[in-house]
Image (spheres, rainbow, N blue to C red):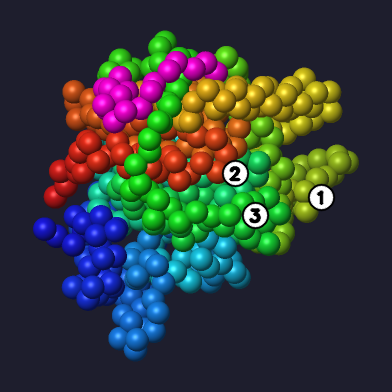
Amino acid sequence: MSICAHSATELKNKIDSGELSSAQVCRAFLDQIERLDEKIGAFIQVDPDQVLRDAEAIDQKRLRGETVGPLSGLPVAIKDNLCTQGQVTSCASKMLANFRPPYDATVIAKLRAADAVLIGKTNLDEFAMGGSTENSAVKQTANPWDVNRVPGGSSGGAAACVAAKMAPLSLGTDTGGSIRQPAAFCGVTGLKPTYGRVSRYGLVAFASSLDQIGPIAANAGDAALLLSAIAGHDALDSTSSPEAVPDYVDVVSQPLTGLKIGLVSEHHGAGVDSEVLSAVDQAVKVFHSLGAEVHEVSFPHSKYGIAAYYIIAPSEASSNLARFDSAHYGYRTDEATMMAELAAEKSANPKGEAESPLIRMYRKSRAEGFGTEVKRRIMLGTYALSAGYYDAYYLKALKVRRLIRQDYDQAFQQVDLVLGPSTPGLPFCLGEMADDPLSMYLQDLCTVGANLAGVPSISIPCGFSKSGLPIGLQLQGPAFAEAKLLQAAHMFQSQTDWHQRHPELP
């Protein structure tokens, strides 16, 4: 059995016992990246020499008898919207193609403190805006199960690299489903924590009231290992919660008794693929066999979720991305060409009102530096926030958000967790929705509710389509119920082998 075929927990145990070194493990995954990533396109950047230096430093630390952190020198892939000091953090955008942050994001600092080895930065939809990783300005990422299909997004590279065994663990971010949807499409496990459970300091913001950082892994036990390393209060993030952090690794394998699960009726009918529904029905039977009670619950306001999300998220994106003005940092248009254009315009119309060089620089730099989807969302958000429309759109969306949160609160008075599909459909073909943004937005149908309500949610593999494509099951819980979600996911995975299946790769 190859090193890369082992789970993160298995590899940690082998490193801790001395059977393997961190350098051996990292070298095996670097070899896997070299073999496969030209075809998959999961990584934006990898520095093999630095990876091996970091791994060898941890091995030397162990040899000296020093305490090694809980990640034991395991390689972890990082979505490229998390700041890494001195290393390019591009957000897969031309705008930040050469941006080297002067500091580490808190989650990166925590990974280093836990003795993880950062194996590389993964591809994403530009500024995390998309559901297919086709909006990257850097490259296209393919689904390891079928390279003609998308891996999901925006954390497509983070999910694809775990599915293709190019990393045992990865960090993604989730604003409306960007961990769970690619996890479902790639047949891996992805957890979006409660808003505030994991610090957002150093995450390049998309929508600040919705964004969360979370783990992507092969199974619930591995996700618990990574979540334990990054969760907790951070004084640098004012939205970070002081809520105590359980030992997720210790509790994940503890069985749940008297578990009550709610099946979301609105996510179990029209608009959801029949093969997805069939796999979810089979998953319900597994939970029944484990002694769980399953009841139907209703989220009556979920039908407004997509509309509310695509007002709130673009509005916050419009505000957050205003900082990229090309004056302080980021892409700047060619100034010589710009000044020549202005001179030609003034010569052609000497009496006309000339645009100032500064305004032209802002306008051209942002037009050239941002991609189509980012521009679309900035314009949507700016419109929703503009005078005369704020109350009609943004304020109303916030009121709907409160009603959606109320649906969750009422459901969790009846049940411990709610269950449904992670996505309404199967992984779609590359380019299939490129010219149909509304259809792409509807891929978030089942996931946006957890972000709007701020509650935790996990996607786990629960089956495959007739054509061999993965299907994801979503479990959602009340705030700070990550431990219960991981326990339920582990129980399910102890009775099924969907998470142990791997794509056939060269």
Residue 195: give its label.
Answer: 2
Task: Mark 2 and mark 3 in contact? Answer it, CB < 8 Å.
Answer: no
Q: Is residue 289 magenta?
A: yes
- Give the x, y percent position of residue 500: 21, 43
Residue 480 as seen in the image, left or right of residue 162: right
Spatial separation of the CA atoms under disc 2 and disc 3: 12 Å
Q: Secondary structure at mark 1?
A: loop
Q: Position of residue 140 (x, y in %)?
A: 36, 44
- What's the residue at 28%, 22% (across, down)? 285
Q: Residue at x 40, y 79 (%)?
A: 67
SS class, disc 2: loop
- The residue that label 3 is drawn on is 242
Residue 215 in view here: yes
User: Magenta includes 274?
Assistant: no
Residue with the most extreme front position: 258
Q: CA distance from mark 1 to mark 3?
A: 48 Å
Res. 434 image quadrant: top left
